[in-house]
Image (spheres, rainbow, N blue to C red):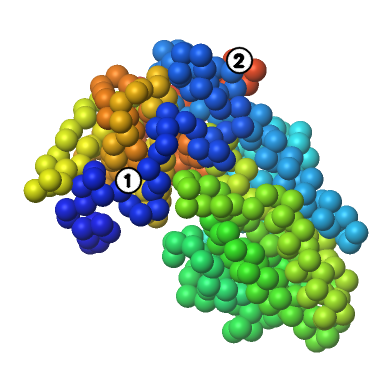
């Protein structure tokens, strides 16, 4: 168990040090809200030209509201930035990481906008295939793929299967042989990089489940085995160091170690690795503590790192790929909730905390409970002249850790029936959603040019009951 980070007497008069006192508690913090989000003449938030009040009436709450233009602009910005930065070399591809959020419409946008798609389970693959996403621009990930998942990817013609272990080299060869096809594979290697992020979302240090260790020699063994297997064609090497990373230093160390392996493969095995995939992980702004880089700065910074390393190792710059998920999907979406119970809890002496309960919670956003994530929020249906007060936004689940926003200033007159919106919930919120306490999952609606449409419908009580066949 973890004690509360600010101690038992942390009251609403003691905001965390990172949380600035708002000069205007109704104002949208720049960079935190999707590109079309403004306050309308009535003071309600308006996203894609649709007011939050209209959405609450017509869609209901809770609801994920996805700003379509914002999502697609970010997707295109990443694609353009990386293809431009690597144009002098062998080029670059950007694969959208569908684990952040995937549905048919998103798969079609990503296709139309010229990105590839990273899927990591049979389920994500099924969504993408049903949407008509071209299989040759897909990558299949996963540390524990079933034969069926590999076979399905091979039958569909998935462009690259990213192999995660020595056992999987043999497994992929066997499945490909059974089908009489050659599997195009990448090898995911672990570089030993300790990414500066939450432990659960760092993926390149040695003691975790992903990848083939470079240090132990497994990565080189895997390259040797793939090259010796006629059923397998080696596309290249893959490295993903973690998620919600702001510092390109981690990519620098990872790129150096992977390129050292590329040089070693050239020397010892006489084989030139032509493709390098450096994964995703670019951080986004969840609150004022975060300062993400632009796609252009990330692309030019990483290109400079790779050029330098390749130059020193006398290697041609390989064709590169990146797999941003959060940085495309995250900022596009906000979750609209309706306020229910507002409770002022006395903590002893002058200390107290205002708990604002909303009609969703850890079933639609588990990131606060799981990663200690700090979110932000605004009153979404109106503006208020009341003074700012620190509140804790909590859900409706039967658990005291069911916190959506740990600390944020809202107007002190926040009350039952108010709409509250939490920004930057487009990545790893719907995709991590659950039915905890048999709470149905919210819908995802896209807003654009004054209209809304449902991408994923709200789960109904009938949906929940339909699974219970015992
Ligand atoms: N590529 C690979 C191989 C990955 O494993 C991931 C994320 C990505 C790309 C995309 O990373 P992104 O650009 O979205 O950071 N549930 C956690 C994040 C888990 C990320 C898993 N892999 C969270 O909510 O923070």
Q: Looking at the image, is 226 positioned above or below residue 429?
A: below
Give the residue pinned by disc 1. 406
User: Counting residues from the N terminus, which is met first, the one under dot 1 or under dot 2?
Assistant: 1
For the residue pair 177 and 444, the one nearer the viewer reads as: 444
Residue 179 is at least partly visible in this image = no
Residue 463 or 298: which is nearer the viewer? 298
The residue at 34%/38% (across/down) is 409
- Residue 6 sits above or below residue 226 on the image: above
Total marks shown come to: 2
Quadrant occupied by the C terminus = top left
Between 352 and 356, the one nearer to me in the picture = 352
Taking the spot 60% from the left edge, 15% from the top edge, the residue there is 450
Residue sitting at the far right: 88
Disc 1 and disc 2: Cα gap in Å?
32 Å
Q: Is mark 2 within 8 Å of ligand 1?
A: no
- Which mark, residue 20? none
Residue 345, x across and y down, in percent: 14, 39
- Give x and y (percent) for residue 221: 68, 81
Quadrant in the rendering for residue 17? bottom left
Element on which disc 2 rests: loop
Residue, disc 2: 450
Label 1: how many residues lie within 10 Å, few (<14), some (14-19) or many (20+)?
many
């Amino acid at each position: 168990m973890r004690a509360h980070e600010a101690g038992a007497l942390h009251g609403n008069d003691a905001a965390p040090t990172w949380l600035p006192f708002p000069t205007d508690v109704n104002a949208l913090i720049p960079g935190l809200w999707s590109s079309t989000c403004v306050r309308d003449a009535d003071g309600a938030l308006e996203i894609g030209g649709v007011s939050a009040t209209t959405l609450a009436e017509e869609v209901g709450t809770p609801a994920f509201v996805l700003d379509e233009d914002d999502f697609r602009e970010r997707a295109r910005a990443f694609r353009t930035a990386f293809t431009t930065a690597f144009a002098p070399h062998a080029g670059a591809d950007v694969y959208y990481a569908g684990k952040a959020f995937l549905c048919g419409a998103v798969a079609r946008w990503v296709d139309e906008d010229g990105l590839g798609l990273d899927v990591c389970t049979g389920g994500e693959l099924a969504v993408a295939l049903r949407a008509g996403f071209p299989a040759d621009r897909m990558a299949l990930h996963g540390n524990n793929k079933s034969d069926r998942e590999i076979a399905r990817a091979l039958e569909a013609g998935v462009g690259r299967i990213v192999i995660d272990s020595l056992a999987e080299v043999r497994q992929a060869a066997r499945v490909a042989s059974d089908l009489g096809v050659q599997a195009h594979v990448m090898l995911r290697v672990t570089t030993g990089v300790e990414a500066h992020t939450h432990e659960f979302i760092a993926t390149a240090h040695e003691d975790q489940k992903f990848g083939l260790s470079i240090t132990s020699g497994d990565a080189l063994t895997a390259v040797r085995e793939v090259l010796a297997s006629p059923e397998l064609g080696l596309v290249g090497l893959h490295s993903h160091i973690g998620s919600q990373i702001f510092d390109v230093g981690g990519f620098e160390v990872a790129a150096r170690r992977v390129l050292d392996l590329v040089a070693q493969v050239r020397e010892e095995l006489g084989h030139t690795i032509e493709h390098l995939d450096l994964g995703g992980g670019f951080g986004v702004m969840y609150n004022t503590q975060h300062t993400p880089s632009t796609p252009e700065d990330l692309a030019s910074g990483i290109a400079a790192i790779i050029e330098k390393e390749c130059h020193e190792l006398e290697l041609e710059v390989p064709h590169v790929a990146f797999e941003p998920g959060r940085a495309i999907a995250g900022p596009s979406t906000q979750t609209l909730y309706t306020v229910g119970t507002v409770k002022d809890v006395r903590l002893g002496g002058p200390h107290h905390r205002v708990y604002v309960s909303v009609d969703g919670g850890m079933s639609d956003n588990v990131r606060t409970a799981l990663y200690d994530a700090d979110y932000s929020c605004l009153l979404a249906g109106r503006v208020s002249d009341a003074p700012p007060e620190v509140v804790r936004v909590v859900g409706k689940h039967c658990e005291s850790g069911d916190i959506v926003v740990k600390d944020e200033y809202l107007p002190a007159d926040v009350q039952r029936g108010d709409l509250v919106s939490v920004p930057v919930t487009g990545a790893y919120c719907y995709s991590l959603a659950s039915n905890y306490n048999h709470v149905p999952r919210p819908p995802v609606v896209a807003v654009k040019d004054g209209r809304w449409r449902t991408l994923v419908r709200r789960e109904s009580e009938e949906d929940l009951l339909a699974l219970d066949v015992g």
